[in-house]
Amino acid sequence: MQSSRVLLPGKVSALSRLNRILKGPQYADAKYFILLDSNCFTHCLPTLVSRVEALQKAEFLELPEREECKDLEIASQVWQTLMESGADRNTVLVNLGGGCISDLGGFVAAGYKRGIRYINVPTTLIGMVDAAIGGKTAVNVGGVKNQVGFFYPPEVVCIEPSFLATLPDREVQSGWLEMLKVQLISGMPMDTNISEQTISDCVQFKMDVVKSDPKDHGIRRILNFGHTFGHAVEAYSHRLGHPLLHGEAVGVGMVCALFLSMHKLGLSETLYQQVRKVVSDHVMLPKYTLRDTETLLEYMRQDKKNENGEICCVLLQEFGVPVIDVAVPEVEIRDCFLKIAK
Ligand code: GLY
């Protein structure tokens, strides 16, 4: 799989370097379309087009916000619009936004005329440290996340942390929980600071993992730490009408994974309590009932990483030592959902 050029924050800003790249010969005939939602249209697009000259004549495609845009019907509408606008194989899609925009945009790019180039310009912290990197593209089907998609990497990923200033604090803090995930699985020091350096460290870690396992056959699965639980927690929170942000749900998911790690792999209780405290400073740990756990388990049974009908999770043996593909009996999962808030 071809790898992406990732522009990390630096002395020369990532946007300036993107500006220079798009003046290069390989983009001479490019026609640009920018995929974005209404928030990014207002808060991020002016910066992007003023700093990247090649995008000044780009056309815009505005999508619904958040998960609603990760839909086959929406993808089909974007393909239709691209066709009507005469987009050919020289078209370059620029995905300006969070993980939902880059997931959908990558999916659209992978399918359009059997594959066109695309560039991710993440504007959220989760987008920067996770979703925009690594070439996973997807749409949701039947209310289940990321059921259909391709591995199809962007040509360029432009990490420009100044976009974070356009976000509500809750959104940024939710993104930090995804950074905490990286710290726990990599063993880099736990650091609540969100800086160009800590962002770059997380991005670099993800790039290294993706490079050694681009198609998610083994080691890349460590990046799903907290996600098997987190996706279920997130989907259920939407169903209950009190939606959690993705990072918040992953935070709850990590507490579940650490609870099980303590009981199954001997992880220290001190680390479990430390992370539980940090996560609960960001999101209230849900008090689930037995009935809730039935629905949560229904979601978890859909996870792509399950094997032979068993729910498989990433657990942590110790700080920085993740273990993939641990089959966990449903009775233990139920027990952990019931106990995390106690
Ligand atoms: N978000 C997990 C991965 O890219 O593998």
Image: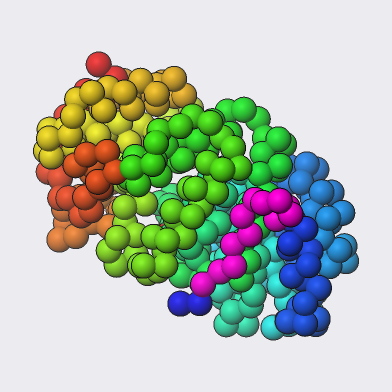
Specify the color scheme: rainbow
Q: Position of residue 60 (x, y in %)?
A: 79, 60
Seen in the picture, residue 194 relative to 216 is either above or below; the reply is above
Residue 298 is at least partly visible in this image: no
Q: Position of residue 158 (x, y in %)?
A: 65, 57
Outermost residue to the front: 11
Between 41 and 51, the residue placed more toward the observer is 51
Q: Position of residue 7 (x, y in %)?
A: 63, 59
Between 4 and 94, the residue placed more toward the observer is 4
- Which segment did they paint magenta? 3-14
Residue 9 among those drawn in magenta:
yes
Q: Is residue 93 rendered to the left or right of residue 340? A: right
Residue 190 among those drawn in magenta:
no
Name the residue at 71% across, 42% down. Answer: 162
Name the residue at 78% across, 67% down. Answer: 20
Name the residue at 29% across, 43% down. Answer: 320
Residue 225 is at least partly visible in this image: yes
Q: Is residue 155 rendered to the left or right of residue 175? A: right
Name the residue at 84% across, 49% down. Answer: 46
Between 293 and 180, the residue placed more toward the observer is 180
Between 259 and 75, the residue placed more toward the observer is 259
Q: Is residue 251 rendered to the left or right of residue 63? A: left
Q: Quadrant of residue 296?
A: top left
Q: Position of residue 11 (x, y in %)?
A: 71, 51
